[in-house]
Structure formats: C-alpha cells, structure tokens
Image (cartoon, rainbow, N blue to C red):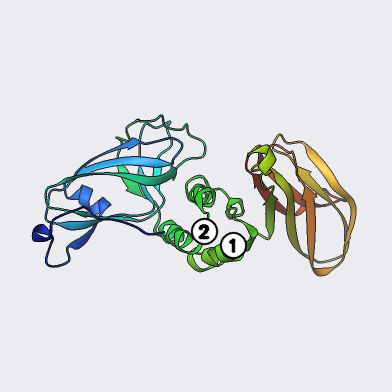
C-alpha cells in the first residue's frame, strides 16, 4: 500500500509547479534535522519529526528505511513508502508504520529515541516490501518475517500468508529475489477459534516437506525430525529409496509443539549420513 500525506495549504501558497521528490536519506545528508521515537507499542508505529532546510519538496520515506537506537534494542524498519509534501523551512511530524529490524534484540519502550542514525536495507527488500503492500491483503506478520529474512538470515519459508495468497507471494519472491529457490515445503497454521480468542494463533498444524533425491543406487533410509532442543524423533524407520531421481513428500503434524527451528532429515541407515534436510521455523 502506498501512503500519501499532503500538508494543508491555501491556494495562494501552493506551488505552481510540482516540487522535486527527495528521499529521506538524501535529505539527512543535506542537513535536515530529525528525531525518531518509538510510538504506540500496539500499533507498530514510529514517530518521526523533521525540519526542512531547502525549497518545497515531496519527501519520500522509503520502505526499508531503518532507524537505529541503542545496540541492544531492535532497530525500527519502515514497512511502507510514505510521501509527504514539505513546504520550505517547515517542521513536520508523522507516525510511520514500522517493524522490528532484529529478531534477537530487545524491543523498544514507548517514547525511546532512535538516536544512533538512519540507514536503508537492501534495494531488493525495498522492492519486495513495495510489492507485498500493493499485491497482498493482510501483510503485517508477513512483512515482519520478510524483514527478518534480510536482517537475521531467516528462511523465506517463515514468511506466512493465507493459502489463497501464497502463490502471489511466491511470485513476488521469484521475480524480485536474486537466486530465490522455492524451499519445497510449507507450514500450515491454525486459524484462531472465535470462541477461544487468539489463544491458538501461530500454532503449527502440520509441516509438509518435499525431498528431491537423485540416488546413484538403492538405499535404506529413515526420516527424522530434530527439535529445537536437539532431541530427534524418527518419523519413518524404514524407507527404501530407489536409484535415480525421486521426489518424496512428507507431512508431519506439529500441533502443540513449541516454537523454534526444527530440521526434517532424510538419512541413510547404513552410515547415518544426511541425504537431504529442510529447516522449519515455527512461530510462537
């Protein structure tokens, strides 16, 4: 979704020719001053104030623009393009949609200042965010997860959207992400029960993995699941894998399992070697 903010002005003082568009990063380099603070915690908002030092301009705060605070606090990443008309020399204040720029760092407290500078994440991520906002409907959780793909090396498979939009999301990744490969598996989540509130939101019902195997000879294998604590479960004890190329599809129920990173593996029984594996990241 592209958001346009226009400052109110009388007809006499509105510009007669369209002003230039200036990226916020370039504005900072030109000497614009700004302050950024954490807004309402339940709204995913960043409060940004800034003062222009030049002529009338349309200021673009691009998706992927990142505001940094203390080292142990999550940066704030703007999730949608915001365009605002800024009259010459004026001061503006905006509330911007934002997400966390680190899955591991602590969250910011309301009103905390992001005073350690501003940067922008990769152009690729900016394009992905633009298309997700334009082409998908409910994207809040998916946008957060895709940001963590770029900031925390999460897998693209952790970016979940309702099944009806999964193909659209995959198209965006295929067209915008260099070297993107379909991870070959999906994790389906429970929809919250209206009578139970959101208690079951985010619990995985099942994970489906596709294992492509090109075996030089027939071999006896097993399928195992390694849990986040390192404990392994044998899902299939005896699986005969024939020689040549085969595609095996496995489904495992994960309802009630804790969040974290799981690994589903196809192992050779004779030597215990891993033939192919898939990581599954379940959200809590």
Would you identify the image quadrant in which residue 68 lies? top left
Closer-to-camera residue (8/23): 8
| Disc 2 from disc 1: Cα separation | 8 Å
The extreme left residue here reads: 12
Above or below 81: residue 254: above
- Residue pictured at 12% horizontal, 62% vertical: 15
Kindly state the secondary structure of the residue where label 1 is placed. helix
Above or below 106: residue 80: below
**For mark 2, does the 10 Å Cα neighbourhood hold few (<14), some (14 to 19), or many (20 or more) residues?**
few
- Residue pictured at 53% horizontal, 63% vertical: 173
Kindly state the secondary structure of the residue where label 2 is placed. loop
Q: Give percent across and percent down for residue 66.
A: 36, 45
Q: Where's the C terminus, which quadrant?
A: top right
**For mark 1, does the 10 Å Cα neighbourhood hold few (<14), some (14 to 19), or many (20 or more) residues?**
some
Dot label at residue 165: 1
Residue 110 visible in the picture: yes
Q: Give percent across and percent down for residue 217.
A: 85, 65
Q: Give percent across and percent down for residue 2.
A: 37, 59
- Residue pictured at 79% horizontal, 40% vertical: 232
Tell me, yes or no, whether the two marked residues, 2 and 1, touch with CB atoms within 8 Å. Answer: yes
Q: Where's the N terminus, which quadrant?
A: bottom left
Q: Give percent across and percent down for residue 76.
A: 39, 41
Horizontal placement of 86 versus 122: left or right?
left
Horizontal placement of 138 versus 189: left or right?
left
């Amino acid at each position: 979704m592209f958001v346009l903010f226009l400052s109110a002005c009388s007809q006499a003082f509105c510009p007669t020719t369209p002003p230039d568009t200036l990226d916020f990063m370039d504005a900072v380099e030109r000497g614009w001053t700004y302050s950024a603070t954490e807004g309402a915690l339940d709204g995913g908002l960043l409060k940004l104030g800034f003062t222009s030092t030049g002529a009338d301009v349309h200021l673009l705060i691009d998706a992927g623009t990142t505001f940094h605070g203390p080292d142990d606090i999550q940066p704030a990443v703007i999730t949608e393009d915001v365009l605002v008309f800024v009259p010459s020399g004026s001061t503006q204040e905006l509330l911007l949609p934002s997400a966390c720029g680190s899955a591991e760092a602590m969250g910011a407290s309301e009103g905390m200042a992001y005073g350690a500078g501003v940067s922008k994440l990769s152009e690729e991520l900016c394009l992905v965010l633009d298309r997700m906002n334009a082409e998908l409907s409910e994207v809040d959780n998916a946008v957060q997860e895709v940001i963590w793909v770029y900031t925390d090396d999460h897998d693209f498979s952790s970016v979940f959207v309702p099944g009806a939009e999964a193909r659209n999301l995959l198209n965006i990744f295929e067209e915008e992400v260099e070297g993107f490969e379909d991870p070959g598996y999906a994790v389906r989540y429970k929809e919250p029960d209206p009578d139970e509130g959101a208690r079951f939101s985010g619990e995985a019902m099942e994970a489906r993995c596709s294992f492509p195997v090109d075996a030089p000879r027939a071999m006896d294998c097993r399928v195992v699941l390694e849990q986040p604590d390192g404990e392994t479960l044998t899902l299939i004890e005896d699986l005969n894998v024939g020689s040549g190329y085969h595609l095996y599809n496995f489904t495992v129920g994960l309802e009630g399992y804790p969040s974290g990173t799981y690994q589903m593996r196809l192992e050779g029984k004779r030597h215990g070697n891993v033939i192919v594996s898939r990581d599954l990241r379940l959200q809590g």
